[in-house]
Image (cartoon, rainbow, N blue to C red):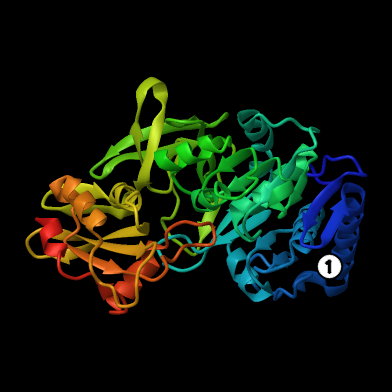
Amino acid sequence: MSGWLRGPRDRVALAFGDRAVRYGELARLVDAARSRGAHEDATRGNAGAAGRKADAPGAGPFVAVPAGSAPVDAVVAVLAGLARGVPVVVGADASAAASFLTGAPAGTELVLTTSGSSGAGPRAVRRTDASWLASAAPLAEAAGLGPGDAAVVAITGPLHVSMHLYAVLHALWLGATATDRRAAATVAHATPTTLARLVDEPAPPPHVIVAGAATDRALHERASARGIRLTEYYGAAELSFVAVGRGEGLRPFPGVEVELRPTPAGRELWARSPYLALDVAGAPGAMRRDARGFATVGDLAAPLDDGAFRVAGRGDAAITTAGTTVLAEDVEARLAAVPGIAAAAVLGMPDRLLGERLIAVVELAAEGPGDTALPQSLLEASRSLPPAWRPRRWYRIPVMPRTDSGKLARGRVRAELEAGRLDELASVAAEAAS
């Protein structure tokens, strides 16, 4: 049976919606699906269990797990495919899955589709099962979770998102119960956006493992005030785990070597580990490798004391204005902390004199119909920013778009702005920029 299933047969393994499955039943479901798939492979020959065309490059059987699949069914399909030794494509139907497997490198076992935050279109991260399984014990140690401790792990997002699928598999590796029932959870996996909601729930989980974006100081303080212990990690679908920490600063995840390499935009974070993906399909340059086995997705990091560092944001979100490089994430964090602002996105737009000018798009926490005045608190916060950080124009968006993993979908914000679908916040933008 799969290396992910380690719980006692009579313990509940999965509890989603009104369906609960114990480890013994889950093992039987996986074995039945594996046998059924193997029989279909033999019957259909080289066309494959999911109907892949025999003349496609690298043609052969595979398992497609479409987005929106019921959680228990999705987990069974993933584990059964891995047990059969065929690639499992998560987040795609059979037709799309076949295209994501075209030209896949040898050893591809898991293909994780993601839209990313740039809006450039879907991409597929292709990796081995072992590259995920190898990180299970180090994550348990870093988070203070012990195999067999009967934890109840809350999963706070759809399983076609890699961090949530991994959270379920890790819970099974622990012998714990993975569930969407937050009230019963002893630990939860969440993005900062979801954590902000958990903090306000009547009975939040006592331990939250946070990933997907940086967690600001204010959210740390709110969680601490509710008695929530945070374990924060930085990673990417392409790199898997890179760094982990509690409180200020992150340090390399066990088994990871990190280098911060100077670039014009700042120090670019490179990592070498057994957890890296094989490659990325559909997004040339999304993951760059060097001859020494290090890889990067273009994130920047700022070194702190004693070998710790802070992830500063994606290098492609660096804006050069009047000769100064500004990271959009830094300005967004300052603006989003302003009372009355639910979320902020900062973009760089071409400017004849400045090179690029900063544009701020904000989601207001509370606003009246047709209100296009810049909130006074936001104006005051803008004046407190360094001059190069001050947005020259301001726009309002009803709801800030995000990816399935909770990251700001900056590409979609830009598309809305360029299409003229956003209201400009009137009257004081020029004053804020002065």
Question: Is residue 363 visible from the viewing direction of this image?
Answer: yes
Residue 367 point in image, percent of width and height: 35, 68
Residue occupying image coordinates x 23% and y 43%: 264
Residue carrying label 1: 41
Residue 180 point in image, percent of width and height: 71, 55
Please name the amino acid that badge 1 sits on: Asp
Q: Is residue 368 above or below residue 241?
A: below
For this rendering, which residue is in front, 15 or 200?
200
Q: Quadrant of residue 343?
A: bottom left
Residue 187 point in image, percent of width and height: 67, 41
Residue occupying image coordinates x 15% and y 69%: 427
Q: Is residue 66 above or below residue 432?
A: below
Badge 1: how crowded within 10 Å, few (<14), some, or many (20+)?
some
Q: In this view, which residue lies farthest toward the left?
A: 353
Quadrant (top left/top right/bottom left/bottom right) for the C terminus? bottom left
Q: In this view, which residue lies farthest toward the top?
A: 306
For this rendering, which residue is in front, 32 or 224?
224
Residue occupying image coordinates x 23% and y 64%: 374
The answer to whether 402 appears left or right of 76 in the picture is left
Question: Is residue 273 visible from the viewing direction of this image?
Answer: no
For this rendering, which residue is in front, 313 or 431?
431
The answer to whether 391 appears left or right of 222 in the picture is left
For this rendering, which residue is in front, 91 or 41?
91
Residue occupying image coordinates x 91% and y 60%: 32
Residue 303 point in image, percent of width and height: 34, 30
Q: Is residue 10 above or below residue 35?
A: above
The answer to whether 197 appears left or right of 148 in the picture is left
Q: Quadrant of residue 71?
A: bottom right
Q: Secondary structure at mark 1?
A: helix
